[in-house]
Image (spheres, helix red, strand yellow):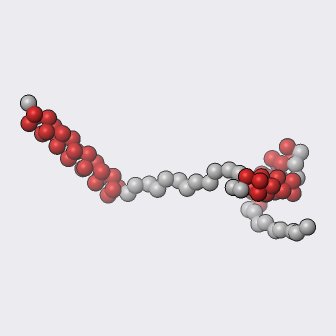
């Protein structure tokens, strides 16, 4: 059997301890079940994602200008068909 060491912020450690105690689990059973699930499913057993990158003001301005230009083009095109 191997031993691992994990560093956690104090507040996270305490919150995890409280949650696991309420579930009747230990940190060891938590990490073992996490690891077994990851190995069985061959993936991390929860979704990891990054927040969508906020568009810069300049990019939003360009998109707004393009939308106005496209609307003008459509209006002009529609008036030419009549």
Q: Quadrant of the N terminus?
A: bottom right
Q: Quadrant of the C terminus?
A: top left
Furthest residue toward right: 1
Name the residue rendered at 30%, 51% in the picture: 63
**Is 78 or 5 nearer to us in this picture?**
78
Residue 65, visible in the rendered structure: yes
Name the residue rendered at 46%, 56% in the picture: 53
Res 12 quadrant in image? bottom right
Where is residue 61 shown, x and y percent of the image? 29, 53
Furthest residue toward top: 82
Res 14 quadrant in image? bottom right
**Is 38 or 72 nearer to us in this picture?**
38
* Vertical comparison of 61 with 1: above or below: above
* Vertical comparison of 38 with 4: above or below: above
Q: Is residue 30 left or right of residue 80?
A: right
Where is residue 21 shown, x and y percent of the image? 87, 47
State the count of labels.
0
**Is 15 or 42 nearer to us in this picture?**
42
**Is 76 or 6 nearer to us in this picture?**
76
Q: Is residue 66 left or right of residue 15?
A: left
Q: Is residue 46 left or right of residue 66?
A: right
Residue 34, visible in the rendered structure: no
Where is residue 78 shown, x and y percent of the image? 14, 35
Name the residue rendered at 75%, 63% in the picture: 8
Name the residue rendered at 77%, 66% in the picture: 7
């Amino acid at each position: 059997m191997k031993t691992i060491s994990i560093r956690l912020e104090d507040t996270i450690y305490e919150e995890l301890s409280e949650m696991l105690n309420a579930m009747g689990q230990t940190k060891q059973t938590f990490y073992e079940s996490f690891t077994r699930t990851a190995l069985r499913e061959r993936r991390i057993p929860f979704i990891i994602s990054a927040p969508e990158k906020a568009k810069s003001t300049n990019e939003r301005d360009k998109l707004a200008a393009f939308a106005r230009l496209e609307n003008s083009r459509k209006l002009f095109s529609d008036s030419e068909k009549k």
